[in-house]
Image (cartoon, rainbow, N blue to C red):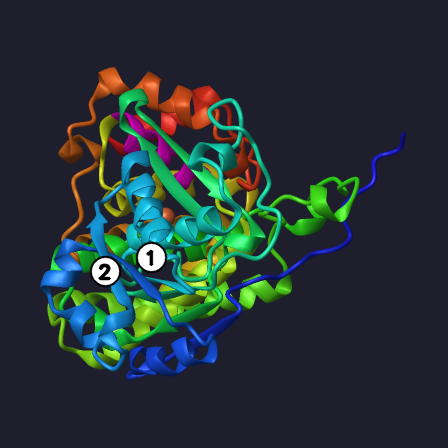
Amino acid sequence: MAYESESVWEFSTAGNITFGLGAAEELDDVVAEYDAESVLVVTDQGVAEAGIVDEVTAPLDLDDVTVFDEVEPDPSLRVFEAACEAAAAVDPDVVVGIGGGSSMDVAKTTSVVHEHGGEILDYVAPPTGGGRDVPGPSVPSICLPTTAGTGSETSPVAVISLPDEDLKVGISSRYQRPDVALVDPGLTVSLPPGPTASSGMDALCHAIEAYVTQRYDAKPAPESRSDRPDYTGRSLVTDQFARAAIENIDDGLRNAVNNGQDIQARRNMSLGSLMAGVAFTNAGLGATHAIAMAAGAIQHTPHGVTIALTLPEVIRFNATSAFDRYADVAELLGEDTSRMSRVEAAEAAATAVERLAADVGIEGGLSTLDVDEGDVEHIAERASSLQRLLAGNPRRVDRDDLETIVRRSL
Ligand SMILES: [Fe+2]
């Protein structure tokens, strides 16, 4: 049969996005819109101890609120199961995730599993899981990010760590996108400089990878609508989100790290992270995320820092296949490319990313995360299996290429 290319793109996001200083104060109204009598809050102890949960839930009738605060970074299956048990005990009408990507991911999956039953691994793709599709809408989920980076507040994905197997797996479904994202930059003010920097670099990478990923019509047409992948490729719509995200992050990140109380910088970062999330959850990602997911699972390296230290070499590798796209990125990051060749302009994007990372305290290569030459093959091998991420990479990238990129990033 003759090759038929995709001719359609889709665009999905959270059911509602409410953005701005004070957005979190509207939780009360949102809960009321759902006529919710029982509310399960999913969060972590750091966020709870910072007083954010008390502040956000204060207007709610506390008799109806149950707080599950056992989420950990890179949450394991055990954490997801504990949250589902908490849900089973109170049968919530809404699930509210307050925190970084981990808390929001656990909240989203809890609402799915509580609604549709079964085990968490039933919903994970084979060979690890049962590959069960989420059959329909779930208990309404409301997400309030307290970092500016993951984009989980609009994404259909939750990432689950299986530490015994050095593996991270995901559940992805359109029915796992949050119903409401309340994005309030005020909730990020107490985030310390280190996590502000690393989550911000992660958000920047989401925007850049979404901007350079393969276009939707560079992929084969699916057999049917339900066979269309989650990442449908970039479109003019995702491009606009990605460009605005890069500009906002470039404007805000240095000041947000330097002075957490700089509310304009925090607003830029929350908006940039949100828009980057909207872009990548539709368009897709690339080799940087494949490598970071592999290194995170094998070496337990922190996601945002790994991303920041790998992205420049991925840009240099990819540049030859997407000169113009990376030249745009360089300009959006403030580089003057007017006197540069196409190659120089594309490579300026790598330099600009390195400079921004260094300005917020992230430099020195993957060796600073205890990744060394002996780990390179293993990480490249694992990364090469992450086809869902690599399929969109603008340049064809095989195992050897990934090895080269990781080695250069040491
Ligand atoms: Fe990321």
Q: What segment is highlighted magenta in the picture?
A: 286-298
Relative height, residue 17 to residue 341 (above, below): below
Residue 232 lies within the magenta run: no
The residue positioned farthest toward the right in the image shown: 1
Which residue is drawn at the image coordinates 13% and 57% (left, top)?
46
186 displayed left or right of 183: left
Q: Which mark is residue 90?
A: 1
Q: Which mark is residue 67?
A: 2
Q: Nearer the viewer, residue 167 or 349?
A: 167
- Residue 399, position as x, y percentages in the image: 46, 21
Report the amino acid beneath label 1: Val
- How many neighbours does mark 1 have within 10 angstroms: few (below 14), some (14-19), or many (20 or more)? some
Magenta span: helix, strand or loop, mainly? helix
Q: Nearer the viewer, residue 394 or 108?
A: 108
Q: Is residue 268 visible?
A: yes
SS at badge 2: strand
Which residue is drawn at the image coordinates 32% and 21% (left, top)?
165
Report the amino acid beneath label 2: Val
Q: Which mark is residue 139?
A: none
Relative height, residue 283 to residue 96 (above, below): above
SS at badge 1: helix
Which residue is drawn at the image coordinates 77% and 43% (left, top)?
221
- How many neighbours does mark 2 have within 10 angstroms: few (below 14), some (14-19), or many (20 or more)? some
Which residue is drawn at the image coordinates 36% and 54% (left, top)?
107
Q: Nearer the viewer, residue 314 or 344?
A: 314
